[in-house]
Image (cartoon, grey):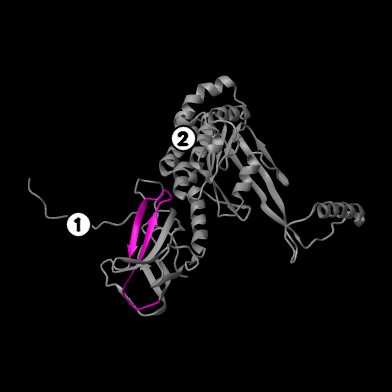
Amino acid sequence: MSDSVIRVENLSKKYVLSHQQEGQSNYKSLREVVSNGAKSLGKKLLKPSGKEIYNSSIEEFWALKDVSFEIKQGDRVGIIGRNGAGKSTLLKILSRITEPTKGRIKINGRIASLLEVGTGFHPELTGRENIFLNGAILGMSKVEIQRKFDEIVDFAEIEKFLDTPVKRYSSGMYVRLAFAVAAHLEPEILIVDEVLAVGDATFQKKCLGKMGEVAEGGRTVIFVSHNMQAIRRLCSKAVYLERGVTKNVSSVEDAIQRYSAQSSMSTFDVDLDSMHRPDGIGEKARLLRLRLAPDTNFSYGEPLKLTITVQCYQKIPDLVIGIGFDTLDGNRIMTLDSDHNQVPLQIPTGIHEIHLCLDKNPLHPTIYLVSPAIHSNNFNLDYLTTPLTWEVSSGPSDLVGDRGFGGCRLPLKAFVANPINI
């Protein structure tokens, strides 16, 4: 007997995109809707020999194309790919939220999915009522749900708000309860999308631990994340998607390296001038642009070269450039300053490109919040109210697995002193 729980064969999903023609309004009257519907029906009835009538405002988009793979019981599978690769579409099809255009899927087992905040919750019902509702949807009996109820509430940390309608929950509370329900009601297959990024770092770590427990219990976990360290820790297999097509990979590490290589080829060029800053900031000097140099990338352990464009409205004799790197939950990991053990820059009036270099990027692969700023004599000349998003990818010198190095790892010079006589 086969231990396969999911078999996907030549799966394809097509969406039909409508493009608004020039001069066409987004808004239509009831008369126009009825008239257009009648015209569409007439065209279908009158078109010769069943041929489609070409419409330049309609475009076919294949989100998935001939995707095939197999997942066995107890597998911990990471779905890896860039934004737009088709990951979310694949999960929606596996969760039976949407139907494929072509191909077939065979699933053996009960699926619990956590695809986006609030999925499967009724906003008017309380947290307590939604636990029982979700359990019923998963096919659990009332007795089974009651047996797991205390564990769910304890894991989600929402006991105080258990009898409050979930429409009043924050996004973090939503996610905590949704994950707790999905993981504790014993589905054979647990599907988790990037939605866990909404939670704080402590809760994300808690969720990864729970997913590991689920897999060790013989159940199957399918996990989508842009956090490659989380994929490394949790997953034993990987499905790599690129523009809706599966690519052959030999291992999880192989998939991560392909993802990182694709990431390193992407450009980073941000218009800082158009971004919001506090009143009174940017009057003497202003940040205009931050971009990645063509011969560099964001990979861990690799050289990093950035170019920042600054406009000075007056001569600045001691300009300092600072870039702060924070985790998604707001903890500062690293700060780069141009005056650290260096003389501040003397910048005349005008627009200037300043090149920034780092011999080796010490940040481990994940997503960071980046805050560039310029200051003079400890006075902030310009900074942004909203940080940028920066994704560090795996480099050739990156280590497999997480050995607790934290977000930033630097080499330490060591030498043996003269022997000590005891």
**C-beta proximity under 8 Å, tags 1 and 2:** no
Looking at the image, which residue is at 71% across and 52% down? 15
Q: Where is residue 289 in the image (x, y as percent from the top left)?
A: 46, 69
Q: Where is residue 376 in the image (x, y as percent from the top left)?
A: 31, 69
Q: Check residue 215 for magenta coloring.
A: no
Cα–Cα gap, marks 1 and 2: 42 Å
Question: What mark, if any, has residue 210 been given in the picture?
Answer: 2
Question: What mark, if any, has residue 415 been given in the picture?
Answer: 1
> In the image as oriented, which residue stretches furthest toward the left?
422
Q: Check residue 331 for magenta coloring.
A: yes
Q: Position of residue 44 (x, y in %)?
A: 88, 53
> Which is nearer the eye, 116 or 229?
116
Instruction: Characterize the magenta stretch by its predominant secondary structure.
Output: strand
* Three-letter amino acid code at the position of disc 2: Lys
* Three-letter amino acid code at the position of disc 1: Phe
Mark 1 or mark 2: whose residue is earlier in sequence: 2
Q: Quadrant of residue 418?
A: bottom left
